[in-house]
């Protein structure tokens, strides 16, 4: 869509919001005259109106927002501006608000949080890290409490804190909760592992606002939340398969699409595998694990590049964050890929942990009845937000016009010349006392500049991988006279850079970025660090042909051109043609990188669909069981009948010995009766006999506990145990399956189809196994009580 049309559409949206704004403004004069008590009393009135159903949240929005505004003026000394109110309306409607850095998103969010908090169902503000969550919580707490709503921080801010059973329940009982995406996501997974009603602490997710939404939903999309279980049985295939893969020739034996991150064996490759491993057909079901390992080894070898995607450091493979260039120790690729890279690098192969529970952030937020997002750069993610959640992005105008000057890029032929120019520029700015924020992609480059500046006697603050609180404090000072701050792109995000007196006159904060980032959204965020709230400021990005982006994604034939080759570096860099070409290479590279990112997210989402449907079904079933207080609602005998019908062979194959053995294994350890009363050759009769036996065992368990409540708890625990143990196996299996689906010949589309087909079949098989386990657990578990008198169930293995 052309920019012009986009602008017109956005204007229409803003005009509609302005009609609501007008209503809100109409309360202003009246509310200014109200006593504190009268204003505070509004909260109780709103709650009552909601309870009586005389008003909906939408009805209350104008008056409720007006109340928050007036309260904010009195309590925080800040009156939310009209543009903030516009953003606040977007947030209540469940869309994405693009608001520039420094426009006051924290205060904006208080209006929809208050409105939705009135329901008592929980309104959450979700941000990227603990520091920001706590900072905003502390800043806004007095406002909410003055208004009579309860507010909590979503976690206890002590490292590795161990929660008492009811502590989390207490936290999530508040009207308003400030938390992070990671904390909330883990709590969601943990809550769905509770083995009893008392272990549940998270209410149904009702309303959430995601701060820095593009970063949380788009940039973090590739790393799902994972709760790891036991180590997997280690495959011994990694090294063997690595050796095989090294014998393969590109295009003959396999084909690869680097940008799409796809790789597959050709027919010749398959034949070669058959011969190498001495097997009839690689794609027979028997060789599931071998296929998986070959895929992993191919991907490790051809799609992961040392020093680009990972470092080998101290004998370990350490991943690199593509956007920040930071090393990510402790983060591992899933399902054997990490081990395949270790095999490639010929270092010790680490343990592969099984996956017990997992969810992507993109899917986590779908669990909310309603959620919204805000950030300074959401517009560039609009296509994906629309596709994923049917959410639009509304661009909120700034309160004052933006005065920042974004200079065109400066172009150099290599890193050395570029770095010299950057240092010279910083020196010149520093001489004028103008504050400079120098942003690099990686920590190494930041360190280099920091040292180089010290050598020029320019004192500077270096921000790399410090704790976020320290980073925030240091970056907050970046607007002081004479300040030179060197930082990586993520450092101190979400922190307001205020200008010291006298800095405006010098032109404000100068942002210098040492290379384009993988995503133009991040470039824009970085520029936006300067020029907040109508301040003057400037930004400029420096490029060279040594930049990561160019090397990684740009197919540069620039210098092969003889005419350019003959020019001196100085002339070359001055040449308009050269500059234009380099610019184009960088822009293309960025586009390719962005597309690749988008595609990877799309793929991840495609794969996630089966898992997400299955997870929802399982979690629903768990909740049904947890909320169940009467065993007769369950039809346990019907479940038993299903299981027996499925387990027993057909009538002609039934023997007494078989049935007795079956009873020992599944129903009763001490079966002494004989089976002469029943016709063993009639399956129907045997089934009904077993059902009767099952009911007898159940009565026995009930009699033993001699208490209806405890018996229900026992039944609950047995069912949950059956569900959970099988579901964990299924989750882990799906992870493994992803790596093994056969994408031979047909390309990726059919691999996904194949994945969903197998995922569904295995889910159906799992459902049968759950039923079988339920029956066995109910019959063969032993119940005891611990010292505190709590019921303990010992399950048969
Ligand atoms: P953003 O998250 O949009 O970058 P912040 O929420 O961090 O911005 O706010 C930036 C600064 O503006 C903060 O110091 C905040 O206290 C201040 N601020 C926000 N709204 C107002 C307002 N209506 N009046 C006065 N100051 C405000
Ligand atoms: Mg912010």
Image (spheres, rainbow, N blue to C red):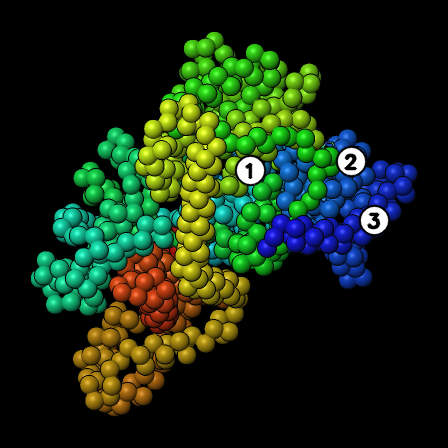
- Regarding residue 150, the answer to whether it shows in the image is no
Specify the quarter for ligand 2.
Answer: top right
Q: Residues within 10 Å of mark 3 (few under 14, many from 20)?
A: few
Q: List the residue tagged with mark 1.
A: 524
Work out whether residue 484 or residue 464 is closer to the camera in this orientation and state it.
484
Q: Which mark is residue 79?
A: 2
Distance of label 2 from label 1 (alpha carbons): 28 Å
**Quadrant for the N terminus in the image:** bottom right
Q: Is residue 589 above or below residue 366?
A: above
> Measuring 26% from the left and 47% from the top, which residue is drawn there?
302
Q: How many marks?
A: 3
At a point 25% along the width and 56% down the height, the residue shown is: 255
Query: Residue 503 at x, y = what percent?
Result: 66, 18
The answer to which of 159 and 690 lies nearer the viewer is 159
Q: Are marks 2 and 3 in contact (CB under 8 Å)?
A: no
Mark 2 CB near ligand 1 (8 Å cut)? yes
Residue 659: percent from left, percent from top? 23, 79
Location of mark 3 (residue): 22
């Amino acid at each position: 869509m052309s920019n012009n049309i986009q602008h017109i559409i956005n204007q229409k949206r803003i005009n509609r919001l302005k009609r609501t704004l007008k209503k809100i403004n109409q309360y202003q004069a009246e509310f200014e005259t109200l006593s504190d008590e009268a204003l505070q009393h509004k909260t109780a009135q709103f709650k009552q109106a909601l309870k009586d159903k005389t008003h909906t949240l939408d009805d209350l929005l104008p008056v409720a927002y007006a109340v928050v505004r007036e309260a904010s003026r009195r309590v925080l000394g800040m009156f939310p501006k009209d543009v903030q109110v516009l953003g606040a309306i977007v947030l209540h409607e469940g869309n994405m608000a693009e608001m520039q850095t420094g426009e006051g998103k924290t205060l904006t969010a208080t209006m929809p949080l208050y409105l939705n908090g009135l329901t008592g169902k929980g309104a959450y503000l979700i941000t990227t890290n603990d520091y920001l969550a706590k900072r905003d919580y502390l800043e806004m707490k007095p406002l909410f409490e003055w208004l009579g709503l309860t507010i909590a921080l979503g976690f206890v801010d002590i490292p590795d804190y161990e929660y008492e059973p009811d502590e989390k329940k207490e936290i999530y009982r508040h009207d308003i909760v400030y938390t992070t995406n990671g904390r909330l996501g883990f709590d969601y997974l943990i809550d769905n592992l509770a083995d009893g009603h008392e272990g549940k602490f998270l209410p149904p997710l009702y309303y959430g606002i995601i701060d820095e939404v593009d970063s949380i939903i788009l940039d973090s999309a590739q790393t799902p939340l994972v709760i790891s279980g036991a180590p997997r049985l280690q495959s011994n295939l990694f090294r063997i398969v690595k050796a095989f893969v090294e014998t393969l020739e590109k295009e003959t034996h396999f084909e690869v699409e680097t940008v799409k991150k796809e790789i597959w064996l050709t027919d010749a490759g398959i034949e070669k595998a058959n011969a190498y491993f001495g097997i009839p057909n690689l794609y027979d079901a028997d060789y599931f694990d071998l296929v998986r390992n070959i895929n992993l080894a191919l991907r490790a070898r051809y799609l992961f590049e040392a020093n680009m995607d990972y470092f080998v450091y101290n004998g370990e493979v350490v991943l690199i964050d593509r956007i920040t260039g930071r090393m990510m120790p402790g983060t591992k690729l899933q399902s054997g890929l990490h081990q395949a890279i270790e095999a490639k690098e010929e270092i010790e192969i680490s343990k592969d942990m099984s996956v017990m529970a997992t969810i992507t952030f993109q899917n986590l937020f779908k669990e909310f009845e309603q959620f919204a997002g805000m950030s300074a750069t959401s517009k560039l993610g609009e296509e994906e937000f629309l596709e994923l959640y049917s959410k639009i992005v509304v661009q909120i105008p700034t309160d004052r016009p933006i005065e920042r000057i974004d200079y065109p890029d400066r172009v150099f032929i290599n890193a050395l010349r570029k770095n010299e120019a950057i240092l010279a520029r910083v020196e010149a700015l520093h001489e004028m006392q103008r504050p400079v924020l120098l942003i690099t992609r990686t920590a190494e480059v930041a360190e280099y500049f920091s040292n180089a500046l010290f050598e020029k006697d320019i004192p500077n603050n270096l921000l790399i991988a410090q704790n976020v609180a320290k980073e925030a404090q240091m970056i907050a000072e970046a607007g002081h006279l004479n300040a030179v701050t060197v930082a990586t792109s993520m450092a101190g995000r979400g922190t307001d850079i205020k200008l010291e007196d006298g800095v405006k006159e010098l032109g404000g904060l100068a942002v210098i970025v040492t290379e384009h980032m993988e995503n133009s959204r991040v470039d824009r965020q970085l520029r936006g660090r300067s020029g907040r709230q109508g301040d003057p400021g400037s930004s400029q990005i420096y490029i060279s042909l040594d930049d990561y982006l160019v090397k990684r994604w740009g197919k540069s034939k620039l210098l092969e051109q003889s005419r350019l080759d003959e020019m001196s570096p100085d002339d070359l860099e001055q040449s308009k043609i050269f500059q234009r070409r380099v610019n184009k290479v960088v822009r293309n590279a960025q586009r390719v990188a962005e597309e690749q990112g988008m595609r990877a997210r799309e793929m991840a989402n495609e794969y996630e669909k089966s898992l997400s449907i299955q997870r929802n079904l399982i979690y629903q079933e768990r909740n049904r069981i947890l909320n169940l207080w009467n065993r007769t609602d369950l039809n346990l005998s019907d479940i038993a009948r299903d299981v027996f019908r499925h387990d027993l062979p057909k009538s002609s194959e039934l023997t007494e010995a078989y049935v007795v053995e079956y009873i020992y294994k599944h129903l009763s350890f001490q079966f002494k009766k004989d089976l002469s009363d029943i016709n063993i050759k009639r399956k129907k009769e045997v089934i009904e006999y077993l059902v009767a036996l099952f009911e007898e065992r159940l009565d026995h368990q009930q009699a033993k506990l001699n208490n209806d409540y405890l018996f229900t708890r026992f039944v609950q625990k047995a069912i949950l145990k059956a569900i959970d143990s099988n579901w964990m196996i299924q989750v882990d299996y799906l992870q493994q399956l992803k790596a093994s689906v056969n994408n031979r010949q047909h390309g990726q589309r059919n691999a996904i189809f194949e994945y969903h087909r197998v995922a569904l079949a295995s889910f159906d098989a799992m459902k049968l196994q759950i039923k079988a386990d339920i029956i066995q657990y109910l019959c063969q578990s032993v119940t005891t009580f611990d010292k505190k008198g709590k019921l303990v169930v010992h399950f048969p293995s």
